[in-house]
Amino acid sequence: MNAAARNREILETAFAEAARGNGAAFRDAMADDIRWTVPGTMRCSKTYEGKENVLVGLFRPVMAQLDANFSYRATRFVAEDDIVVVQLEGRNTTTSGKPYNNSYCYVCRMEDGKLKDVVEYLDTKLFSELIEPGAFPAK
Amino acid sequence: MSAAANKELMQEIYDELAKGNRMPFRNAMAEDFRWIMKGKTAWSRTYEGRNAVRIELLQPLFEQFGSDYKNTPLRIFADGDHVIVECEGRVTTKSGKPYNNQYCLIFRIENGKIKEMTEYLDTALVNETLAPPPWFTKAA
């Protein structure tokens, strides 16, 4: 199996587990020194350096705005060498009961079987309206 | 075509777009090209066919631009029929606002033509910077 196929399989497994509500599998796939970038013009748009900063600085405040564990399903994987691009469709509800169905595209760089660098594209308008005010309030 | 050939095609198209030349992109669109723009903006929908892409998306979009549009590729990857292009646009709207969006585009290529593209972008920036397309106002 070549590198692309191996990396793709690792992420297919991690996202299949995440779709079943097992977020631990995805967290386990993250390298300790992962870099996670949210491009764009939102208050939370930046690069989060290291797993702890990603989990505490990004994932935790977002999850706190949802009424249940984060739920999404991968719709396509495209892999070349150490890169795997994953398209995802989320199906979630905010704590105030609004549907939060965002679309994501993760550009992932893998190293030694772990996620080393992720660039996360998403519908920033929807995020800004439903998640950002509670998760990343204006200073 | 191989992944390498598809990647080369998109690399050439984006090298030209970086210089402001949109013709290679236009020429590579299949007649039944589908452009899927993700998100919940006034522009977000699926544009079916090259004519709809030109008339309902590109014409009204470029109508709002007040400077030359340049789009620079950051990274390009390919896997079979699919080519991923991460790129950065640079343009100023006629009302003087910078519209510098970052995109992740997923292309599907068939026989050297672009059959489908799914576009992820900073939709909050679209919403803040661009006016809705004319057909959106009419439909609303």
Image (cartoon, grey):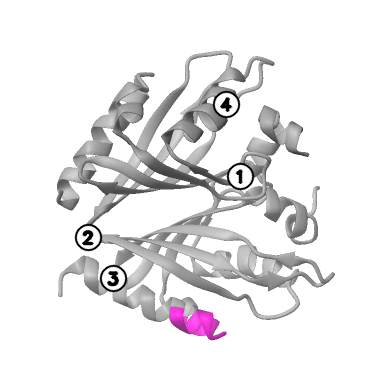
Estimate the x, y position of residue B62 in percent, counting from the top left.
54, 21
Q: Are marks 2 and 3 on the same chain?
A: yes
Q: Which mark is residue B9?
A: none
Name the residue carrying label 3. Answer: A7
Disc 2 packing (10 Å; few <14; some 14–19; many ≥20): some
Residue designated by label 4: B61
Q: Amino acid at mark 1?
A: Ser
Dominant secondary structure of the residues highlighted in magenta in the image? helix
**Amino acid type of the residue that numbered disc 2 sits on in the rendered structure:** Asp
User: Gap between marks 3 and 4, in whole Å?
Assistant: 38 Å
Nearer the camera: disc 2 or disc 4: 4
Q: Position of residue B40 (x, y in %)?
A: 67, 49
Disc 2, disc 1: CB below 8 Å?
no
Residue positioned 65% across, 80% down in the render = A69
Q: Quadrant of the N terminus of chain A?
A: bottom left
Q: Is residue B48 above or below residue A121?
A: above
Residue A72, quarter of the rendered image: bottom right
Residue annotated with mark 2: A81
State the extent of the magenta-drawn residues as a range: A16-25
Q: Crowdedness of circle 4 by 10 Å Cα count: few (<14), some, many (20+)?
A: some
Q: Chain of mark 1?
A: B
Output the chain of dot 2: A
SS label for mark 2: loop
Tell me whether marks 4 and 1 sit on the same chain.
yes
Q: Are marks 2 and 4 in contact (CB under 8 Å)?
A: no
Q: Residue at x 80, y 72 (%)?
A: A95
- Residue at mark 4 to residue at mark 1: CA–CA distance: 12 Å
| Tag of residue B44 | 1
Q: Secondary structure at mark 1?
A: loop
